[in-house]
């Protein structure tokens, strides 16, 4: 089955710096790759997604890149702010469902 | 729309008791997913339904777990009998059309089995 590996598990940056989270997936048939942000006590919320026919997508301070050949995709957050502190999950589609990575706890220090 | 609604938000029960978690998906969505979240295993998909029919229940850990979706607006996840290792946050999510697209998550039910 599909397996999604996510790194790092924790990431601490200074406010204003960039943060990068990376994921790899195992099944080349996967064609949809969302990123979710989970704040304490809440459910995961979609922040950006990318489909396999696109190499990069950007939404304000957030961007995602996809390398289908290498089967990896990354989340880039620029000009980080304290409110970006949360747990971030990548996911890959497989068989009509989403398989999630283990999560990255991002801490943005003011 | 109020989003995906789960109840209860918190549940504390004794080992051996039956636990029922409830979910109301977003109106118009026809795919529903149950996930379990723990520190050790992250977000695990337990089961998902499409048009009220269970499509894949390979993630259901044991026969103690069962899920139903009697209609398009309601689903339950039942654990009977519950065990301490079932303690986790259980999320319900829904999406549209059965193909993989944006899945909206509920707030989750934090289950503690003592």
Image (spheres, rainbow, N blue to C red):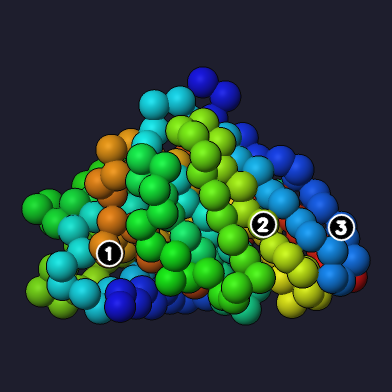
Instruction: List the residue tagged with mark 2.
Output: B78
> How far apart, in angstroms, are the residues tagged by discs 2 and 3?
14 Å
Front-most of B28 and A93?
A: B28
- Please count the marks in the image: 3
Crowdedness of circle 2 by 10 Å Cα count: few (<14), some, many (20+)?
A: some
- Is B82 situated above or below B24? below
In the rendered structure, find residue B12 and report the number of the disc placed on it. Answer: 3
Front-most of B16 and B7?
A: B16
Crowdedness of circle 3 by 10 Å Cα count: few (<14), some, many (20+)?
A: few
Image quarter for residue B4?
A: top right
Q: Is residue B35 left or right of residue B79?
A: left
Q: Nearer the viewer, mark 1 or mark 2?
A: 2
- Is A26 situated above or below B100? below
Q: Nearer the viewer, mark 2 or mark 3?
A: 2
Q: Is residue B79 left or right of residue A36?
A: right
Crowdedness of circle 1 by 10 Å Cα count: few (<14), some, many (20+)?
A: some
Q: Earlier in the sequence, mark 2 or mark 3?
A: 3
Disc 1 to disc 2: CB gap under 8 Å = no
**Disc 3: host chain:** B
Q: For the point 41% across and 54% down, which residue is it?
A: B54
Pinpoint residue A63: horizontal percent, then vertical percent.
30, 50
Q: For the point 60% across and 73% down, which residue is it?
A: B63
Q: For the point 87% across and 60% down, which residue is it?
A: B13
Instruction: List the residue tagged with mark 1.
Output: A94
- Is A83 situated above or below B64? above
Q: Secondary structure at mark 1?
A: strand
Q: Is residue A107 visible?
A: yes
> How far apart, in angstroms, are the residues tagged by discs 1 and 2?
25 Å
Q: Secondary structure at mark 2?
A: strand
Q: For the point 62% across and 54% down, which residue is it?
A: B77
């Amino acid at each position: 089955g599909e397996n999604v590996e996510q790194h790092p598990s924790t990431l601490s940056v200074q406010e204003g710096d960039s943060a990068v989270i990376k994921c790899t997936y195992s099944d080349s048939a996967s064609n949809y790759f969302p990123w979710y942000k989970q704040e304490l006590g809440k459910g995961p919320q979609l922040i950006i997604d990318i489909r396999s026919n696109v190499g990069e997508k950007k939404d304000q301070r957030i961007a995602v890149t996809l390398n289908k050949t290498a089967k990896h995709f990354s989340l880039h957050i620029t000009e980080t702010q304290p409110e970006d502190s949360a747990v971030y999950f990548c996911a890959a589609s497989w068989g009509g469902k989403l398989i999630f990575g283990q999560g990255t706890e991002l801490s943005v220090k003011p | 729309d109020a989003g995906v609604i789960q109840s209860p938000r918190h549940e504390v029960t004794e080992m051996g008791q039956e636990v029922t978690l409830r979910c109301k998906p977003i109106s118009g969505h026809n795919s529903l997913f149950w996930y379990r979240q723990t520190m050790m295993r992250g977000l695990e998909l337990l089961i998902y339904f499409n048009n009220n029919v269970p499509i894949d229940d390979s993630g259901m850990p044991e026969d103690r777990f069962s899920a139903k979706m009697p209609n398009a607006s309601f689903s339950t996840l039942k654990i009977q009998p519950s065990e301490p290792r079932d303690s986790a946050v259980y999320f319900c999510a829904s999406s549209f059309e059965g193909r993989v697209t944006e899945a909206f998550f509920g707030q989750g039910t934090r289950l503690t089995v003592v």
